[in-house]
């Protein structure tokens, strides 16, 4: 029986997922760039019309990539958001987790790719914000909020989450993607420990 016009193929979702995996692997390897739809089609071993069939256009494809990257990060966020017995332990755990993520090339490239694409296309920027950046901050907020000694003020907790997340992103871009290791190398462990000690001191009033 012929497929009804406008109906999806029976394996539409599986084919779409396979295409997403291919273009994500391509986009997060090598140089961070804004590949054309043609380059993405070649990377997925398919055609531009096929990508348009599944994602409408290049913007739709990149937004779908942001959504998929957010889904892939869910287990990491669930693990990180678990509270601790004290605010010092929670802050230190956040920074130690960040130190691990800094050594993960895919983590660094995911955020760099999201920023490059997002600043060039507002709708993609919103997708990166919604599916990757904000959930990253939210899980830190939940961790701090569930830990004894954390501020009661939600705005202060969010400020603390930004204070944890921002230097990690900056260090990752500086050291790994911008050539900082050869120009101004950092001792990641020492730097992260200093940041952890400082922010813990802010919470406990010893800074």
Image (cartoon, rainbow, N blue to C red):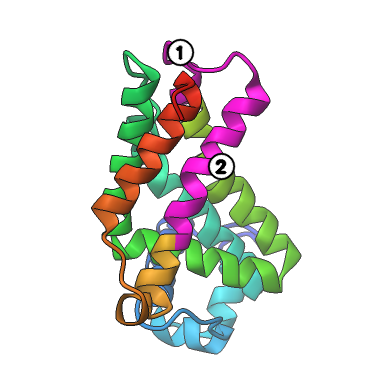
Judge whether 148 appears above or below 36 on screen: above
Crowding at mark 1 (Cα within 10 Å: few <14, some 14-19, many 20+):
some
CA distance for labels 2 and 1: 18 Å
Q: Nearer the viewer, residue 133 or 164?
A: 164
Q: Residue at x 58, y 43 (%)?
A: 134
Q: Which residue is at the front of the view, 44 or 167? A: 167
Residue 96, horizontal then vertical, whole percent? 28, 41
Mark 2 or mark 1: which is in front?
A: 1
Counting every numbered tag in the picture gives 2
Rendering coords of residue 107 (x, y %): 37, 58
The label number, if any, that marks residue 85 in the structure image: none
Query: Which residue in the protein does label 1 denote?
Result: 149
Q: Residue at x 52, y 29 (%)?
A: 141
Q: Residue at image x 49%, y 23%? A: 203
Quarter of the view holding residue 63 = bottom right
- Decide: few, some or many residues near mark 2? Use Cα within 10 Å; few <14, some 14-19, many ≥20: some
Up-down: is 174 above or below 159? below
Q: Which residue is mark 2?
A: 162
Percent x, y of residue 194:
34, 44
* Residue 147 on the magenta segment: yes
> Which residue shows up at 46% across the image and 30% down it?
207
Q: Position of residue 144 (x, y in %)?
A: 46, 23
Q: Quadrant of residue 174?
A: bottom left
Per the rendered image, the range of residues in magenta is 142-170
């Amino acid at each position: 029986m012929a497929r009804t016009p406008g109906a999806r193929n029976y394996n539409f979702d599986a084919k779409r997922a396979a295409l997403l995996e291919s273009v994500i692997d391509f986009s997060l390897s090598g140089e961070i760039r804004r590949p054309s739809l043609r380059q993405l089609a070649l990377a997925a071993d398919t055609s531009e019309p096929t990508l348009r069939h599944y994602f409408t256009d290049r913007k739709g494809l990149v937004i779908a990539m942001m959504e998929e990257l957010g889904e892939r990060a869910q287990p990491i966020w669930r693990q990180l958001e678990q509270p601790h017995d004290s605010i010092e332990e929670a802050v230190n755990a956040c920074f130690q987790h960040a130190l691990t993520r800094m050594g993960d090339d895919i983590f660094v490239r995911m955020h760099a790719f999201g920023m490059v694409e997002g600043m060039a296309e507002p709708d993609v920027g919103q997708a990166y914000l919604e599916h990757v950046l904000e959930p990253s901050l939210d899980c830190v907020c939940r961790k701090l909020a569930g830990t004894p000694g954390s501020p009661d003020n939600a705005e202060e907790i969010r400020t603390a989450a930004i204070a944890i997340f921002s230097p990690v992103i900056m260090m990752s871009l500086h050291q790994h993607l911008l050539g900082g290791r050869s120009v101004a190398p950092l001792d990641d462990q020492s730097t992260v420990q200093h940041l952890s000690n400082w922010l813990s001191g802010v919470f406990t009033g010893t800074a």
